[in-house]
Amino acid sequence: MEKITNETEEFLESIYRLQERNGVVKTSKLVKMLRVAPGTVTNTVERLEKRGLVTHETYKGVKLTGKGRNIALSVLRKHRLSERLLTDVLHMEWNRVHEAACRLEHGITDDVAENIENVLDEPRTCPHGNPIPTTGGGIFEEHSHPLSELSPGEEGTVTRITDEEAALLERIDRFGLRPGTRVRVLENAFPGGPVTASIRQSECEISARTASVVRVRVLGGGSHARRRVEKRRVKTEE
C-alpha cells in the first residue's frame, strides 16, 4: 500500500476543512488555502482520485471518499488536540497555535494523541470551538449559523471560528467573539455588507468576511430559518 505522506495528509485535511465550511470544494479554494500553484493542485487531485481518496467532477469540485475522510479526520484530531496542548499547557495565544499544530500533527502517532487527550481530560473542541474527532472517526457537529447570515434582532452564542488564520483571529479577539460569547445582531447589510452587533454591551461593526467565519447557535430560530427557506426557493425558481 502506498504510504500516506505528510503532504497527502495536509491536502486531505484541507479538503475536509473546506467541505465543512462551504460544502463544495473548488480547486481554486485549495490553491488559496495551500498556497501552491494551480497545476500542483490539479496533479494532486488526479493522483488522489486514482488512489480512491477523493472524487472530482468538472465544474462541481472535489469531495473526499469515505477512505479519504477517515484519513482527514485522523489528522484533524491530532491537529486540534495539539492546539489544545499548546494553549492549555504551554499557554500559547490562540491566534498562534494553528501554524504550530500544522507542524506537530504529522509527527503524532495515534497512541500519543490518545495520551494527550487523556492528560487534557478529553476536550471536545479546539481553542477555536471546532470539534475534535474521536478515535473512531466520529465528530459532533453542533447546529449553528454564520454570524453574517443572522437578521437584525437575532441573537445567540458563538460556538466556533471556522478559519484559524492568525490575523483574522486577532480581529475576532478584538471584538471579543470567542466561543461562548453572547452576540446580538443590530444591523446586517446582507449580502456582502458589514454586520453591526452588540457584544458585551458594546456596539461593533464587523466585516462580512469576518462575520462569515464566526458560527453562532441562534436562540429560538427566528427569521434566519425563514430566510434560508426563501433563498432555497429563489434558487429553485432560477
Image (cartoon, rainbow, N blue to C red):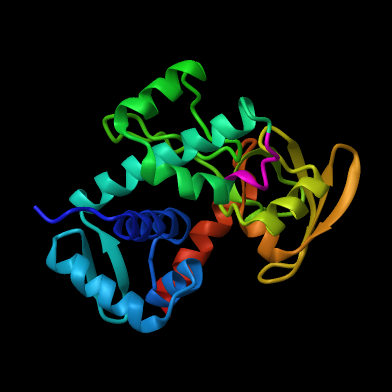
State whether the magenta stretch is mostly helix, strand or loop.
loop
Of residue 119 and residue 215, the one placed in the foreground of this image is 119
| Residue 212 position within the rendered picture, expressed as x and y whole percent measured from the top left | 62, 59
Q: Quadrant of the C terminus?
A: bottom left
Q: Is residue 86 at all visible to an observer of this figure?
A: yes
Of residue 88 and residue 158, the one placed in the foreground of this image is 88
Q: Is residue 53 magenta?
A: no
Q: Which residue is found at the position 26% from the left and 71% from the top?
A: 45
Q: Is residue 93 magenta?
A: yes
Give the residue at the far right of this rendering: 202
Q: Which residue is found at the position 35% from the left and 61% from the top?
A: 11
| Residue 175 position within the rendered picture, expressed as x and y whole percent measured from the top left | 81, 48
Of residue 33 and residue 162, the one placed in the foreground of this image is 33
Residue 68, compared with residue 45, is above or below; it is: above
Instruction: Please state if 91 lies on the left or on the right of 63 as rendered.
Output: right
Q: Which residues are magenta?
A: 92-97
Give the residue at the far left of this rendering: 1
Of residue 166 and residue 90, the one placed in the foreground of this image is 90
Q: Is residue 148 at all visible to an observer of this figure?
A: no
Residue 131, compared with residue 190, is above or below; it is: above
Q: Which residue is found at the position 13% from the left and 56% from the top?
A: 2
Where residue 43 sits, quadrant-wise, is bottom left
| Residue 126 position within the rendered picture, expressed as x and y whole percent measured from the top left | 54, 35
